[in-house]
Amino acid sequence: MVANFEAEETITSALKVIDQMQQTQDFHRDIGHFNSIVNNANDIVKEVAPHLPPDFAQRWLLAEAQMNPELRERFDNAHNSPADRAKAESYIKRTLLRFRKEIAAQPDPDISAHIMAVTHAVRGASGKAPEAGRPDYGMMSNAAFREHVRSTHGFDPGT
């Protein structure tokens, strides 16, 4: 009876070790899969929005997995069967396409700063021209006064 108990204990212990090894193997497989997805997303960032920080893709994917239970479920079940793997890959591909669209809409701060500087310069240069000084009517001859009134006000004063 004691031998059976010890044998069962040994078997239970061995099964626990095997289970832990399987969990470790699954964990490493999932980390590798996630890292390959992050690498694909990093390639998209380099192509579409190189001004974003280097860890942007990883942070975005982690946040997306938190907010999107379907993405999390597809990723977690990707290794259950070939059909689940295909569904997961398809869903991840659509997610990366959405990621591409979202980061393409992010403005580049360097370009935005340049545009703002040019806009400011153009607005500053296109202000109203300074008004001419007031004419000194006392120093004008009759002909000069007459020409001034004609050109400024559009009529001939007749002097």
Image (spheres, rainbow, N blue to C red):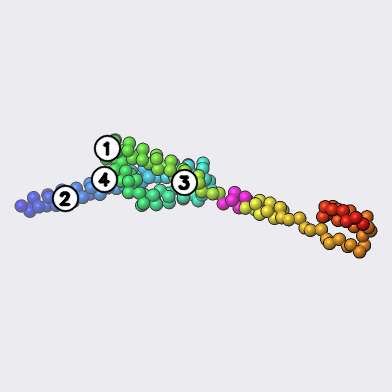
Q: Real-space Cα distance between discs 3 and 1?
A: 31 Å
In this view of the protein, can residue 106 be seen by the observer?
yes
Labelled disc at residue 22: 4
Secondary structure predominantly adopted by residues drawn in magenta: helix
Identify the element where label 2 is drawn: helix
Q: CA distance from mark 3 to mark 4?
A: 37 Å
Q: Dot 1 lies on which element?
A: loop
Magenta span covers which residues? 109-115
Q: Earlier in the sequence, mark 1 or mark 2?
A: 2
Q: What residue is shown with label 3?
A: 102
Viewer-nearest of labels 3 and 1?
3
Query: Residue at coordinates 36% horizontally, 40% vertically from top-left?
Result: 91
> Residue, x 82% and y 55% (percent of image)?
153
Q: Earlier in the sequence, mark 3 or mark 2?
A: 2
Kind of residue at disc 1? Ser
Label 1 sits on residue: 81
Of pointers 4 and 2, the one earlier in the residue sequence: 2
Q: Residues within 10 Å of mark 2 (few under 14, many from 20)?
A: few
Q: CA separation, marks 1 and 2?
A: 28 Å
Residue at x 5%, y 52% (from the top left corner): 1
Query: Does the magenta segment cover residue 139?
Result: no
| Residue type for callout 2 | Thr
Report helix, strand or loop for mark 3.
Answer: helix
